[in-house]
Amino acid sequence: MTVAVTTTAPQQGALLPPPRRLPGRHSLRPPRMVQIDPVSVLTVFLITLLVLPARYIVGPLGGAGTPATVMAVLMLVWYALSTLSPRWTPLRGPQPLRHVILFFALALLAGYVAGTTRPLSADELNTADMALIQLAGWAGIALVTADGIAGMDRLEDIRHRLVIGAAFVASIGLIQFFTGIEPSRFLALPGLVENGASMLFEREDFFRPMGTATHPIEMGMVLAMVLPLALHGALYGPERMRRRRWIMVVLIAVAAPMSVSRSALLGLAVALIVLLPVWPPAWRLRALLITGIGVILMRLAVPGLIGTVLNLVTVIGEDDSTVARTDDYAEVVRAWAVRPFFGQGTGTYLPTIYRVLDNQYLLTLVEAGLVGLLALLALLCSGWMLARGARRASADPAARHLAQCLAASVAVAIFGFGTFDAFSFPMISNVLFLILGFCGALWRLQTRGEQPAPVARGIIPRL
């Protein structure tokens, strides 16, 4: 007897059990996406930059192996990968900072190539390679910041965290100045190698603090650059947080001159010169009174400090340091004349082989030629122009003030690059490109008023 077995298709809407997943087989579901906020990434970067001492490095990477530089290079990789997809690319809408960073990078790359056309010592080639690693990190910092910050609230968050980091550096510096103790050696991560001495410098019987930076002048200039941003938070921050923010302003403003560096003192003056004209008359009067009272209090609390710092300024042109800088000019002209357009090689003018150049503009002229110097000037001027452009485009008083504060920070850097070789110091160079990224982000948010592309907010696949 034959039994016929028939099957019927399930009716529409019938509930069917889910298909059983066979062991050892992977699901064919598309990968889920997880959102990573660039501001959170930049916050971790600030911790590696300002909390971890800059003299501790990943040994095989040499001077370019600070944890902050490694993370900055990874940010450039993240940014570059995001451009591969038309859906997630951050390259949407105008962003002048991108073009400036590209011009600056190509100029230094041209200097690197020009350097390889002549015989290079092992040390010169090594530092040239490290300069390219640093360049990649600088580009990553600026581009992720300029294109990744989604709104003014997130820009305010990372600005505030930068100020907190600077206040931490200032606090370490104050401990070093008053006690001569070097607490930053306890902040290094295991496995890092110390690159440079941990002993404090001295000048006129004063300890010269360096915080978590590599040199007192670097600490002083970083604090001078961040002070305008700290003032913005104290003046426009939430009322309940004003007192804490003023404490950070005081820490930064007091620690900067304690570096016993005339560059830091003049940098503070530059910041005030840029800020005072846009402040209301009552603010200007208070700022001048507070500055005068602060000088008197520091003179009483630390006898001799103010006189020492002011003496460094009044003897400009006569002291040994200034004379040594002016003596560099003839040597720089001779070196530049040999290779005027692209220089002798990015990162190759070593103090151990040639001489110390305490002027980043002259150093760039020799290493990357006239093209490199023009690129550096364009880079610095772009920060000023973007900040000022954001101020003109905005009707919000807080945003306009933030723009002027960013312009003041860039002005401090423009001045400071003429007083020491800033790109030889990791902390100040990374802070500069972060502030340039702030300028680009603020310009974008105030002129375009739109959110960045999803990848700029950090959409990445999670498998």
Image (cartoon, rainbow, N blue to C red):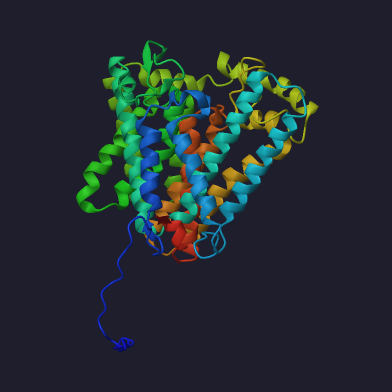
| Quadrant assignment for the N terminus | bottom left
Residue at 32%, 88% (x, y): give it. 6
State the residue in front, 138 or 271: 138
Q: In the rendering, at what x and y percent does residue 278 appear?
A: 43, 52
Q: Is residue 105 or residue 172 the one in the foreground?
A: 105
- Image quarter hosting the C terminus: bottom left
Is residue 118 rendered to the left or right of residue 100?
right
Residue 300: quadrant of the picture: top left
Which residue reaches farthest front? 1
In the rendered image, residue 51, in percent from the top left (x then y), is placed at 34, 32
| Residue 222 in the image, given as x and y percentages of width and height | 43, 33
User: Is 47 on the left-hand or right-hand side of 326?
Assistant: left
Residue drawn at 54 percent across, 61 percent down? 85
| Residue 285 visible in the picture | no
Count how many numbered circles sit on residues in the image: 0
Toward the top, the furthest residue is: 205
**Is the residue 460 above or below the residue 18 in the image?**
above
Return the residue nearer the eye: 406 or 62.
62
Residue 174 appears in the rendering:
yes
Instruction: Estimate the x, y position of residue 360 in percent, counting from the top left.
Output: 60, 30
